[in-house]
Amino acid sequence: MRNVAIVGIGHSRFGKRSDVNVAELAFESIKQAIEDAKIDKKQIQNVTLGSAGGWYEESLPAVIINEYAGFENVGTMRVEAACASGSAAVRSAYLSVASGEADITLAIGVEKMTEVDTLTSVELMGRAGSYLWEFENYGMTFPAYYALYAVSHMNKFGTTEEDLARVAVKAHHYASLNPLAHFQKEITIEKALNSQVVAWPLKLYDACPISDGSAAVVLASEDVARKMTDTPIWIRGIGLSSDSANLSKRGEYLGLEATVQSSRRAYSLARTSPGDIDVATCHDCFTIAELMAYEDLGLCEKGQGAKLVREGQTEIGGKIAVNPDGGLKAKGHPIGATGVSMMVEISKQLRHEAGKRQAPIKNGIGLVHNVGGTGHYCYVTVLSRSL
Amino acid sequence: MSNEDSLPSRRTLSLRFNIAISKTKEFWAALREGKLITTKCTSCGKVTFPPQADCPNCMSSGHEWIDLGTDAVLVTFTNVQITPTSFVNHDPYIVGIGRLADGPNVLAWVEGATVEQLRPGDRLRLEARVSPEGNPYYVFVKN
Ligand SMILES: [Zn+2]
């Protein structure tokens, strides 16, 4: 396998983007990524699109986007791993280069979620489990699946609703420093705690918003990357795993086993450990998900996630900066775009291009943790400044 | 309604899936009669819930139907306040995962208690029900 680097990054503004259709939205990121890589688009040998689909009118978004962006006679496909579709797309583009099939590839993530009404969106996400046994008769929703974990975690470890609110306050703070984030305003713990209950004990401010957005990365082989840029960001390892579709088949509801498995595989491939990581994007679709991610990724012991956020250890300047872009929670979570957006953020951080939300970089190692569904899929990617 | 920024499509799409249950029809027939049963592999003895004809452990398709049992302990739960489009006429509902005395976990609505009255570890009973539309389902009832 050859070494592979991220050599170009692009990211749209996240939010309610009723000003663009899905192809126009993807184009914003594609153009930036190609300009950032300083290549001609004809040099891209294949394109992979991460998009869950179903929220917008196009059934074949990969070819719609290829046509709009002028990729002629270029192989493409859409990959689906629910909310981890973006990481799955990057993995596909990575494997194409690593295997020697191609020297330069493009991975795009996009979702246009606000073309349907909010409760239809709630329905589409609620069906993302084991349909007949969780939705047909019981009407599960995405917050409800994570609420099952929150209740168990709070009962076992004493995690409180205030701890969850702290995660939300941190996310909104960093989003206010990120001009591309869906939310641009700070919130208080009181505001989070007093917001509407969506699936007890989770409230509106425990949940990521429904967002439109896109992101893109250009990948290149080591030989090509070194000629293209002085700041290649190396993909050192991608670990992936999955868990049962039906949540009733899980164990204790205290963490996501798919995160544990995929992160250990990624650390092993990258020959690194949690203590070496300077900055991470963790999959915080809900506040409880960020606390469980700290534990499952090995950033702290099981049950200590709330302590980490109480002590500010996951803020910029703490032990490890987590979600300095505002996270899914406040930057927004356009499903298929999220994994690619995370790659873009960690690349910016490792290149020292993150501006007001730049984390200190000591070891030059960053982590992308991208979960699909309720721990149904997980992809963990280790990125670094040097090989 | 239309404005300069968006074109609301005139074409609507309504999807209703016909879900095949021929390999587990015994489960649905028994449920309609008020009984809860599930599959047990006749090769390796693996009990599965939800029922499935093909064993995920040894991949054998030989199976028998056994009583699921009704005594359960509440593992975790939530109260769904914002309900999806197709549940829009329902009041908020409590969903729990219960661990049956005989092994498998079951996810179902929990009746007979408010969310404030529930704690992990509570004893539950699994009961068969038929919906107003005539579909069989099952719920937990707090003892
Ligand atoms: Zn078997």
Image (cartoon, rainbow, N blue to C red):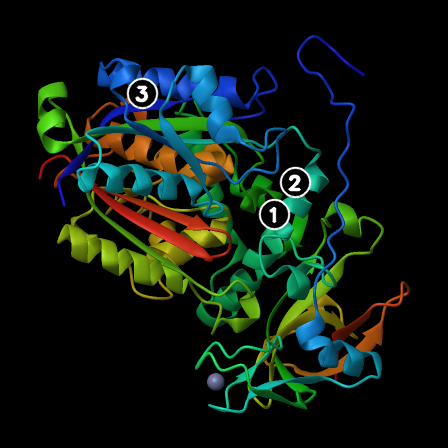
Q: Is residue A317 visible?
A: no
Helix, strand or loop at label 3? It is helix
Helix, strand or loop at label 2? It is helix
Residue ID at (47%, 23%): A65
Please state if A118 lies on the left or on the right of A381 as rendered.
right
Per the image, the residue denoted by label 1 is A125
Q: Inspect the image, locate mark 1, and give the three-letter code of the amino acid beneath it.
A: Met
Distance of mark 3 from mark 2, alpha carbons?
29 Å
Helix, strand or loop at label 1? It is helix
Sequence-first tag of 3 and 2: 3
Q: Is residue A115 above or below residue A269?
A: above
Q: Chain of mark 1?
A: A
Please state if A176 lies on the left or on the right of A216 as rendered.
right
Image coordinates for residue A291, horizontal then vertical, percent: 41, 54
The residue lying furthest to the top in this view is B4
Residue ID at (15%, 53%): A272
Distance of mark 3 from mark 1, alpha carbons?
30 Å
Per the image, the residue denoted by label 2 is A121
Q: Is residue A247 above or below residue A14?
A: below
Q: Inspect the image, locate mark 2, and give the three-letter code of the amino acid beneath it.
A: Ser
Residue ID at (76%, 76%): B28
Residue ID at (49%, 71%): A250
